[in-house]
Image (cartoon, rainbow, N blue to C red):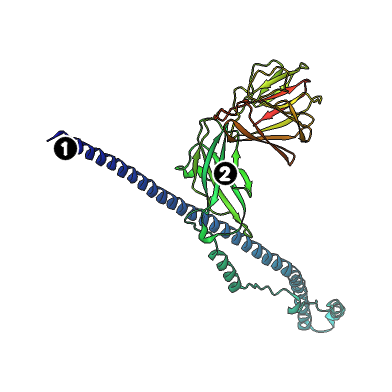
Amino acid sequence: MSGVQEESLRDTMDSAEEYVTRLEDLVKSVEAAERQVETSASQSASEVEKAFKQLSDSILDVLNKRKDVLLSEISSIRQDGLAPLQACRSLIASKLANTKLYIAEGGDILRIGGMAVSESTEKFCEKASFLGSLPAVPQLEEVPYVSFQWNLGTIEEQVGKSVQSLGRISRMGPVQITQMDEKPGALLVHWEEIDFEHSVDIHAFRLQYAYGDIRNQPHLMGTNFHDVYEGPDTQYLVRDLRPSTSYTFRVCCLAEGESEWSAWSLPRIGSSSITPFSWALDNPNYVVTNEGKIAAKASNIPSTLCSCTAQFGPGHCIEFTILECGDSGTEQGLVLCSDSVLGGNLMHSGVLFLNAEGSIYVDGAEKMMKLPPLKVGAKVCFLCEHIRDGKLRVHIGTADKTVIYDWTPIGDSNDITPPKLYFAICFNSKGWKVLVE
């Protein structure tokens, strides 16, 4: 065999082995699909059995309770109706017994006869005045005639219609999670409608997540999920996630005019390997708590606290929440910067500064637009996107007002690498407390 033939044979063998590998991967994909069908069908069948057993028990319990109420009403009517009749019967029986004794006494007098019993006869006749009138006995129309009415046909029809519309089997949820983007300590979850054959006007979406991968644990699917978002948007930033930890997500929708949520989407697993936004721990003028997310000014010495690293960049959204306020001032507020060594000067290139009064400075120059002053409960959001080269577009929003600036923070428009920025706070007086997410 020549060298060319051997090389050709080896290439063919390599291609065949690669083909085998791809076929084996396809087999694994088919097996995963089969497991999904089998598992979801088995779980749904179990849920149907459980639901109808629960409904059956509940209906039987309601029927038995209603039956007991009706029987109790019959018993009460019976007792109320018989009580006066029994008293009347007792009175009649007493009078009847006394009258029979009186008749027997008269018969004895007649049998004796003669003048010897004249005195007894007079006394007997005197007792006739005590016979009195007959007791009043109620007419049949005046006593209860207990009856029971129900329209079985109507009830069966109503129950039948309700049962016929009970439950719904879905081949696939109408909304599916399409993408999950990693953010610092967070995931931006996207979803969209996929059931275009039965397209409806969707009123709201509902996103849930659970800790860990619970896709193959049906007993956890119903209890471990909790709501994280409900509203009209088709994406949501899920914050406060532990780095490199798996989470299971699912989404459903509520159609316009409907009262029940749709079937859930396929569960999707996501995790973020990006460190959450957090403050540095080396500034004695600030007390940092809550895993580095909350910084409180602890002295009246003017000081700047930066993030632990350059964490903020294109595609990121950072939110500052003002938890407490100290003294106001124009030289203190929120900062984005390319260098963590700022000192007390925030009016130079490479710094974007929003002061406590709402004024904005970019590279030391004050902008015309102003935002509302910082106050307790205020939330300030910085959103960053990369335009080209080293230029960024920064959105700053608070209290339903947003401003947008194009900015080259590193001062070199020829650098095509999207820059990473530090975020910082600068306060002169104690009493300020800020949460970063």
Question: What's the mark number on residue 5?
Answer: 1
Quarter of the image where one finds residue 93: bottom right
Quarter of the figure that contains the C terminus? top right
Q: Residues within 10 Å of mark 2 (few under 14, many from 20)?
A: some
Tell me the element at label 2.
strand
Distance of mark 1 from mark 2, alpha carbons?
60 Å
Q: Quadrant of the N terminus?
A: top left
Q: Which residue is farthest front?
A: 414
Where in the figure is residue 231, as x and y percent of width and height? Answer: 64, 48
Asked if residue 375 can be seen in this view, the reply is no
Inspect the image, locate mark 2, and give the three-letter code of the amino acid beneath it: Gln
- The residue pinned by badge 2 equals 208
Q: Please, is residue 302 above or below residue 92 in the view?
A: above
428 relative position to 407: left or right: right
x and y, in percent, of residue 112 in the image:
77, 81
- The one nearer the camera, 88 or 72, is 72
Report whether residue 239 is seen.
Answer: yes
* Vertical order, 246 against 122 (above or below): above
Q: In screen coordinates, is 423 left or right of 117?
A: left
**The residue under label 1 is which amino acid type?**
Gln
Dot 1 or dot 2, earlier in sequence: 1
Q: Residues within 10 Å of mark 1 (few under 14, many from 20)?
A: few
